[in-house]
């Protein structure tokens, strides 16, 4: 498999991604990867909104490998886009609904 630049990208269980050759990938549960990503998220988290946002993205990404997690890369991207849009507007307004 190659990325958009033509570089080889590893696939299989070494990356935590199981691929059958289609675009629909499932992520195998990997408690070590969950712990690693969440530790990084805890280290990154700070007082600034940017640090909190980045920590939240890392934590949400760890859900891909969490046995109890129920998310997909597409859902994570939608969530990140939503967070950035709300941040650009200056925060939530009273009539905003959370569509995550």
Image (cartoon, rainbow, N blue to C red):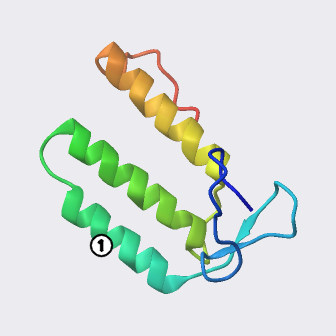
Which residue corresponds to mark 1? 39
The quarter holding residue 68 reads bottom right
3 horizontally vs 44: left or right: right
State left or right for residue 45 relative to residue 16: left
- Where's the N terminus, which quadrant? bottom right
Q: Nearer the viewer, residue 77 or 15?
A: 15
Q: Is residue 49 above or below residue 72?
A: above
Q: At 58% from the left edge and 36% from the top edge, which residue is drawn?
A: 78
The quadrant of the rendering that contains the C terminus is top right
- Taking the image as shown, residue 10 lies to the left or right of residue 23, namely left
Other-residue count near label 1 (Cα within 10 Å), few / some / many at <14 / 14–19 / ≥20 = some
Residue ID at (15%, 51%): 46
Q: Residue furthest left?
A: 47
Q: Look at the image and tell me whether residue 80 can be seen.
A: yes
Q: Secondary structure at mark 1?
A: helix
Residue at 49% x, 30% y is 82
Measured as percent of width and height from the top left, residue 80 is found at: 48, 38
- Residue at position x 62%, y 56% in the image: 7
Q: Position of residue 48 (x, y in %)?
A: 15, 40
């Amino acid at each position: 498999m190659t990325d958009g630049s033509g570089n080889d990208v590893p696939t299989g269980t070494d990356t935590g991604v199981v691929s059958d050759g289609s675009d629909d990938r499932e992520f195998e549960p990997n408690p070590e990867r969950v712990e690693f990503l969440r530790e990084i998220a805890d280290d990154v988290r700070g007082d600034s909104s940017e640090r909190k946002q980045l920590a939240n993205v890392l934590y949400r990404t760890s859900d891909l490998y969490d046995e109890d997690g129920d998310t997909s890369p597409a859902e994570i991207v939608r969530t990140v886009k939503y967070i950035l849009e709300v941040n650009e507007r200056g925060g939530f307004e009273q009539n905003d609904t959370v569509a995550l």
